[in-house]
Image (spheres, rainbow, N blue to C red):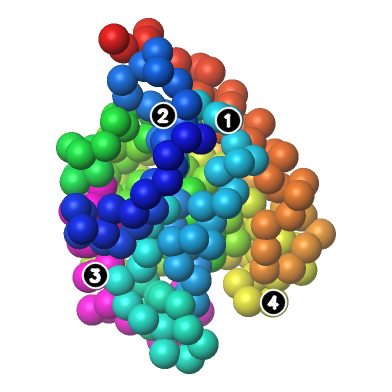
Amino acid sequence: MTSLYGGEQQLSLTHQILLPQNPKVSVHPTIIYLHGRGADEEDLLGLSGSFDERFLSIAVRAPFRFEYGGGYTWYDILELGKPQHDMFKSSYEKLLQFIDEALAQYPVDPARLFLFGFSMGTVMAYALALTRPELFAGIVANSGYLAEATHLNYKWNEIAGKEVLITHGGLDDVIPAAASRRALELFQKANARVVYKEYDVAHQLSDRSLVDISAWLKERLDSTSSKPNA
């Protein structure tokens, strides 16, 4: 990676971006990182070093301050699996706007755009991927859940063949692994190309999961490689 800079002055959500070192192409495969509750855009950006060096990385900050421990949040939680409606709706709409802006402003290859979520960021990633599946080549969903009772209409009939990797810690006492197993069931029913990995850890990403995620991303990246752009 050769360049790191903030985009809060240019786009609608605060974020950080890392550009890959590849002068042979004008657009890059891209990962958009969505952090969990109480974190910020820096939380997941460091993971980019674990993944293929061809990726452009964009890490986005949630729009609401988390009042009970610092950092930021996408929404308040009414109960597990049930986001506070107005905050969830606002975050979803801001993320869609941000993605449109990022596609217009940054050298993103629109055919190779991946979402990477952790915890609450996974909830937002699911929401984006299931309402605008045409925008994303794939999704990496870690330690989260699929919010089923929201204002959104998920396009399950357009998910067939979509690339999805779901990971979760079997010892997770924040969001039980059963939540990811439920998402797995729904994606399988919709005929997505879904892979599920469960690890002997708590609410976290492990070294093993990062190795598996890296391999999964590289395989999808290689299979969707486009000709170099001048």
Return the residue at label 2.
29
Corner quadrant of residue 71: bottom left
Task: Give the CA separation, mark 4 to mark 2.
Answer: 34 Å
- Name the chief secondary structure element in magenta: helix
- Mark with earlier residue (3, 1): 1
**Can you identify the residue that label 1 sits on?**
52
The span from disc 4 to disc 3 (Cα, nearest Å) is 26 Å
**Nearer the observer, 155 or 47:** 47
Q: Is residue 59 magenta?
A: no
Closest to the observer: 219 or 104? 104
* Mark 1, other Cα within 10 Å: few <14 / some 14–19 / many ≥20: some
Would you say 96 lies left or right of 59 here?
left
Query: Mark 3 = which residue?
Result: 89
- How packed mark 3 is, by other alpha carbons closer than 10 Å (few <14, some 14-19, many 20 or more), is some
Q: Is residue 98 magenta?
A: yes
Which residue carries the number 4 mark? 173
Which residue does the image show at 66% across and 31% down from the upper left?
215
Pair 4/1: label in front: 1
Which segment is the magenta one? 78-99
